[in-house]
Image (tube, rainbow, N blue to C red):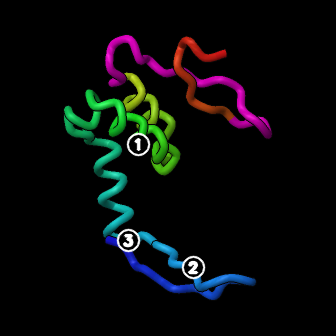
Amino acid sequence: WLIRKDEPGAAAAPRRTLYLTPEGRAELERRLREPGELDISDENRWFTLLAFLRHLDAPEEQAALQLRAPLGRQVKRAPGRGGGSRLVLPDEP
């Protein structure tokens, strides 16, 4: 699912960079569309899902995942920098 490449650094040691294969991208999208119950209920896993949410192209799919937020942790969209939007918890400004 991943390809690891060593790339030269500008002034430092080479960097290790990870790239998704097409199969890895498909798996990531599947896990975002069909998360397991633990992915929803565990706070660390939930925030990891949200971090990768932008990889789902359809806003409807993003919204469907956000609606599965654990009770008391419903997320919403707020204006972001550059005219975009960001996900925030209800108690954030």
Q: Nearer the viewer, residue 59 or 75?
A: 75
- Residue labelled with disc 2: 15
Residue 51, placed above or below residue 25:
above
Q: Residue pushed farthest left?
A: 37
Does residue 72 show up magenta in the picture?
yes
Q: Earlier in the sequence, mark 1 or mark 3?
A: 3
- Residue labelled with disc 1: 48
Residue 63 figure quarter: top left
Residue 11 figure quarter: bottom right
The three-letter code of the residue at mark 3 reads: Pro
Q: Residues within 10 Å of mark 1 (few under 14, many from 20)?
A: few
Q: CA distance from mark 2 to mark 3?
A: 22 Å
Q: Earlier in the sequence, mark 2 or mark 3?
A: 2
Residue at the image point whose x is 34% and y is 30% from the top:
43
Q: What segment is highlighted magenta in the picture?
A: 68-84
Residue at the image point whose x is 47% and y is 43% from the top:
53
- Residue labelled with disc 3: 22
Residue 50 figure quarter: top left
The three-letter code of the residue at mark 1 reads: Thr
What number of labels is visible?
A: 3
